[in-house]
Image (cartoon, rainbow, N blue to C red):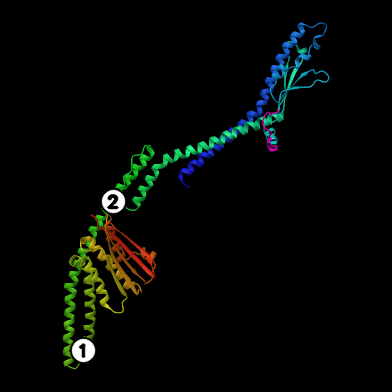
C-alpha cells in the first residue's frame, strides 16, 4: 500500500476513535442532562410555591397553616414554564385526585430504536427523582417532587447522537480530503528521491536532487547525493583498476606468447626436423618400424605446432589494432569456418559504421566476440551461431555485441559460472563502462554486451 494511503488510513482510524469517544460522551451527557433538568425544575417550582405559600399565609383567613397548599393557583401556565420538557412535578402531601404537572415531552427528539433504549439504561443506570422543600423554614409547607421521564431521556440522547454523527461524518470527510492533499503534497519530494535512486541503480550515480524545504527530506536528499558521489568514485576507481589489471594481463599474455614462440616453437621445429631425418634414414636402411615411429613423432609434432599456433593467436595482441574492428571480426569468423566443414554455420551481421572504432573499445568488442564464439563452438552442440555487432549512434553512442546459438544450455547456470572466459569478458566490459547479460534464446543462449563509445 502506498505511504499516502497508509497515513490517511491511520488518520481516519484516529478520527473514528475520537468520534466514537465523543459519541459515548455525548450520549452520557445527553442522558444525564435530564437529571440536571429535573433538579432545576424541582428547584424552580419549589421557589415559586414558596412565594405562593408565604402570600397565602399572610392572606389566610381561618385556614390552618398545613392547609394553605396546594391551592388552585399553583397549577398555572406560569408554573408549567418552570418545568423542563420530560419532567413531571407533584406536590406532597398530595390531595385527593391530584395529578403530576408535566412539562411538554412530545417532539423531544426522535424515537430511539429498541436496542438503544435497552442498552443506554443498562450501562448508564436509571434516573432518580428530586425532592425539594417548599420552604426550608416551614416544614409544614410540603415538598416538591420532580420525576424525570426515562423515555424522554433516551430520545434526547438519541437525537443528540444523530446530530453528532451528521457533523462527525462531514468532519471526517473534510479531514480525509484535506489530510490526503496535505500528506500527498508533503510526500511529493519522495518520488523525486525514488526516481534518483532508480537512476543510481541503473548506473547513473551522479544524480542532482533539488533542495527540499523539509529538514528530514533535505537530509535524505543530501545522503542520497553523497552516496551517489561515493558510488561514482568507487566505480571509477574500480574501472581504472580493472583496466590496469587487463593491461598487465595483456602484457603477460604477450610475454607468454613470445616465450612459447621462441622456446616451444623452436624446440618443436627441432623435434620435427630430427623426426624427418630419422624417417629418411630408416627408409634408406629399410627399418620400417623406426620409420613408422618417426612418422608418428612427426604427426604429433605437427599437432602440437597447430595447437601452439592457435594458442599464440589467442595470446597475441588482438587483430583490431592491426586490421580494425570490422576486418578483424570478418577474419575471426572466417578462421572458425575454415577449420572444419563439420562445424556449425556461423552468421556474421555487422550494422552501423565501425570504421572509426579503435582502442580499448575495439579490443573489448573483439575479445567478447572471440570468447563467446569459442564457448558456443567448444561447449555446446549448436548447429547455427549468430554474431551480431551493431553500432547505436546518437546521444548514447554504444556498441552492441550479441552472440546467439541453438546449442541448449542453462542461462542462469552459465551466468553464475566462475569460468575464466566469462569472468574475463565481464571484467573487460565492466572496465569499459558497459554491461553484460546472458539470457535464454531460441534453443540455446544469448550473450549480449553493450560497450559505450562516448568519451
Density class for disc 2 (Cα within 10 Å; few <14, some 14-19, many ≥20) is few
Residue at 74% from the left image edge and 8% from the top image edge: 55
Q: Which mark, by number, is residue 291?
A: 1
Residue placed most toward the observer, 132 or 383: 383
Q: Residue 391 at x, y = what percent?
A: 27, 61
Residue extent of the magenta highlight: 106-116
Tell me which corner region of the image, top left, top right, bottom left or bottom right, holds residue 389: bottom left
Q: Which of marks 2 and 1 is in front?
A: 2
Viewer-proximal residue, 16 or 175?
A: 175
Residue 447: x %, y % from top left: 33, 65
The residue indicated by pointer 2 is 234
Identity of the residue furthest to the bottom in this view: 286
Q: Which residue is drawn at 16% across and 79% down?
A: 270
- Asked if residue 112 is among those painted magenta in the image, a careful observer would answer yes
Tell me the chief SS of the magenta region. loop
Asked which quadrant contains residue 188, the reply is: top left
Left/right of residue 299 with respect to residue 83 in the rendered view: left
Using the image, determine if residue 132 lies above or below residue 403: above
Was residue 235 drawn as part of the magenta stretch in this picture? no
- Judged from the image, the secondary structure of the residue bearing numbered disc 1 is helix
**What secondary structure is marked by label 2?**
helix
Please give the name of the residue rendered at 83% of the width and 6% of the height, measured from the top-left corner: 62
Amino acid at each position: 500500500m502506498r505511504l499516502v494511503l497508509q497515513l490517511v488510513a491511520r488518520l481516519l482510524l484516529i478520527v473514528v476513535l475520537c468520534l466514537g469517544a465523543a459519541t459515548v460522551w455525548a450520549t452520557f451527557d445527553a442522558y444525564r442532562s435530564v437529571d440536571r433538568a429535573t433538579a432545576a425544575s424541582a428547584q424552580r417550582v419549589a421557589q415559586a410555591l414558596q412565594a405562593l405559600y408565604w402570600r397565602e399565609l399572610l392572606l389566610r383567613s381561618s385556614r390552618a397553616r398545613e392547609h394553605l397548599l396546594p391551592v388552585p393557583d399553583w397549577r398555572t401556565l406560569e408554573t408549567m414554564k418552570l418545568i423542563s420538557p420530560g419532567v413531571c412535578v407533584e406536590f406532597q402531601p398530595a390531595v385527593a385526585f391530584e395529578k403530576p404537572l408535566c412539562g411538554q415531552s412530545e417532539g423531544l427528539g426522535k424515537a430511539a430504536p429498541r436496542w438503544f433504549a435497552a442498552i443506554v439504561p443498562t450501562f448508564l443506570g436509571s434516573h432518580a427523582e428530586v425532592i425539594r422543600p417548599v420552604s426550608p423554614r416551614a416544614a409544614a409547607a410540603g415538598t416538591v417532587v420532580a420525576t424525570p421521564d426515562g423515555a424522554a431521556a433516551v430520545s434526547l440522547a438519541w437525537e443528540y447522537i444523530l446530530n453528532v454523527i451528521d457533523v462527525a461524518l462531514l468532519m471526517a470527510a473534510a479531514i480525509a480530503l484535506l489530510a490526503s492533499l496535505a500528506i500527498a503534497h508533503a510526500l511529493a519530494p519522495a518520488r523525486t528521491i525514488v526516481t534518483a535512486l532508480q537512476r543510481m541503480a541503473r548506473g547513473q550515480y551522479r544524480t542532482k536532487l533539488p533542495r527540499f524545504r523539509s529538514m528530514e527530506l533535505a537530509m535524505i536528499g543530501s545522503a542520497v547525493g553523497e552516496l551517489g558521489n561515493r558510488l561514482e568514485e568507487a566505480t571509477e576507481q574500480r574501472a581504472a583498476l580493472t583496466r590496469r589489471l587487463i593491461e598487465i594481463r595483456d602484457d603477460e599474455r604477450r610475454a607468454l606468447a613470445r616465450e612459447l614462440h621462441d622456446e616451444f616453437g623452436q624446440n618443436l621445429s627441432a623435434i620435427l626436423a630430427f623426426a624427418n631425418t630419422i624417417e629418411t634414414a630408416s627408409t634408406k636402411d629399410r627399418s620400417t618400424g623406426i620409420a613408422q615411429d618417426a612418422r608418428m613423432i612427426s604427426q604429433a609434432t605437427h599437432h602440437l605446432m597447430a595447437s601452439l599456433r592457435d594458442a599464440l593467436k589467442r595470446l597475441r595482441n588482438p587483430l583490431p589494432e592491426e586490421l580494425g574492428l570490422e576486418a578483424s571480426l570478418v577474419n575471426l569468423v572466417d578462421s572458425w569456418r575454415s577449420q572444419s566443414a563439420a562445424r556449425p554455420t556461423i552468421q556474421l551481421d555487422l550494422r552501423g559504421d565501425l570504421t572509426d572504432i579503435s582502442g580499448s573499445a575495439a579490443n573489448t568488442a573483439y575479445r567478447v566476440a572471440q570468447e563467446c564464439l569459442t564457448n558456443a563452438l567448444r561447449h555446446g552442440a549448436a548447429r547455427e551461431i549468430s554474431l551480431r555487432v551493431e553500432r547505436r549512434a546518437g546521444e548514447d553512442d554504444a556498441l552492441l555485441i550479441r552472440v546467439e546459438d541453438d546449442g541448449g544450455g542453462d542461462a542462469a547456470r552459465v551466468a553464475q559460472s566462475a569460468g575464466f572466459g566469462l569472468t574475463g569478458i565481464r571484467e573487460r566490459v565492466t572496465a569499459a563502462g558497459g554491461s553484460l547479460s546472458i539470457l535464454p534464446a531460441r534453443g540455446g543462449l544469448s550473450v549480449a554486451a553493450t560497450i559505450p563509445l562516448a568519451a
